[in-house]
Amino acid sequence: MSPLRIGLIVSDDLDYGLDLANALADADVSVTLYLSQTNLAYYLGVPPNASSSDALAASLYSKRLLPESVIVRLFQFPRMRDPRSLPAANRLRRMIEADSLDVAHILMGPGELWIAVLACLVRKTPVVSTMIIPQPNLGEKLPAFVLWTIAKLLTLGSDLIIVNGADQVDVVRRLYSVPAHRVAYVSLIPRIAAAKWAEGQCEEEPYTVLFPGKAQPRKGLEFLIRAQPYVNEKIPNARFLIAAHGEDLPRCRELIEDESKFEIREGFLTSAKLAEYFQKASLVALPYLSASTSGMLTTAYVFGKPVVATNVGALPEYVREGETGFLVPPADPERLAQAIVRVLQDEALRRRMEENARAWVRCEQERVAFETREVYLKAQAGL
């Protein structure tokens, strides 16, 4: 019996696509990975027009981000409002159909119009789509009705919708009028690709709290900064490593009371630098005000780091209270500080959390691949 032939179409969240492609390949699924050429260049740290598509694809193999069994094809879309994106989507549709896939699987973030259009264009192949963020987070730049329209378009073109949070099943059913039998819950794949960027082994720096990613108002960096005095009152040696870029960083900088307690690495981070910072951290703080899921959370687990996060969105599904980290209410710097102190002060607890995080990664990668494959079979059978 020949293996399932799956096409993974990814525009923005390349780590997600790479991780899922690796897990599926390990589960004997034949994978063709369709990636945005521009975003892949940025991901690999090269100028978009400096390398050919063949050279970019070859880098994924040489850096061991993908096994040789995964086929890579690249596509390009102009800007969202550029009408040339429609023929570009149609070219991608022809590419997908020429590959004679059993199922096309689209990973779509919010506002990715032409990826949603692609779902409607593909007719000869069953379409499964992962709606990474089913409803807008706080502070989204596009108006809510635009995001809703694009997400609705995706549901119209997809045979099955995957969500990464259990409560998101009802969200998709309610917001987009999708029948229950067309929505499947599969948890977020661990971010294995992030660890492959590690350039050598960096020593952990004791009492280091890492905040990684984008500094947007909804990410709650302000409340981590406000928690710092409480933390240092109990643990004078604690320090805060902020590896971030975004519009909220200048405002948050002004809230810092003691600059000696902070190391701020500002700007877009290469994957290698991000891997370095995760290795240095003692724990990872995610004080979000709004979230669906969090790739940074599962990345922390890949590096064996405990997480202190807020109980928003689907984050409580991924943080095992007292086992891989702690959950606190959003916008509560004192409770955030207490949880951070609890982890940093108890070395035995922190080490147990590290072991539990790594165990979670080992179990989840195999389970997610199995459950995703089951969704493919359901789509292939016509539900």
Image (spheres, helix red, strand yellow):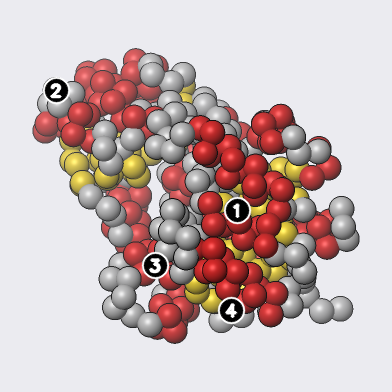
Amino acid marked by disc 3:
Thr
Look at the numbered disc 3 and give the secondary structure of its residue: helix
Element carrying mark 2: loop
Residue assigned mark 1:
116
Residue with the mark numbered 3: 38
For residue 6, the mark is none
The amino acid sitting under disc 1 is: Ala
84 displayed left or right of 126: left
Element assignment for label 4: strand
Q: Which x, y percent locates residue 164? A: 63, 43
Secondary structure at numbered mark 1: helix
Look at label 4 and name its amino acid: Ile
Q: Nearer the viewer, residue 201 or 315?
A: 315
Q: Residues within 10 Å of mark 3 (few under 14, many from 20)?
A: many
Which residue type does callout 2 highlight? Glu
User: What is the x, y in percent for residue 195?
Assistant: 43, 60
Please identify, in this view, whether the residue under mark 1 or under mark 3 is nearer the observer. Answer: 1
**To which quarter of the image does residue 107 belong?**
bottom right
- Front residue of 167 and 262: 167
Residue at horizontal 46 percent and vertical 78 percent from the top: 57
Q: On the image, numbered disc 4 is attached to which residue?
A: 71
**Mark sitting earlier along the chain (1/3):** 3
Q: Can you give x and y, in whole percent of width and height, for residue 339 in the image?
A: 40, 23
For the point 71% across and 48% down, which residue is it? 156
Which badge, 1 or 2, is on the more N-terminal residue?
1
Which residue lies under the disc numbered 2?
257
Which of the marked residues, 1 or 4, is nearer the chain's N terminus?
A: 4
Above or below, 364 against 45 in this view is above
Residue depicted at 36% across the width and 69% down the height: 41
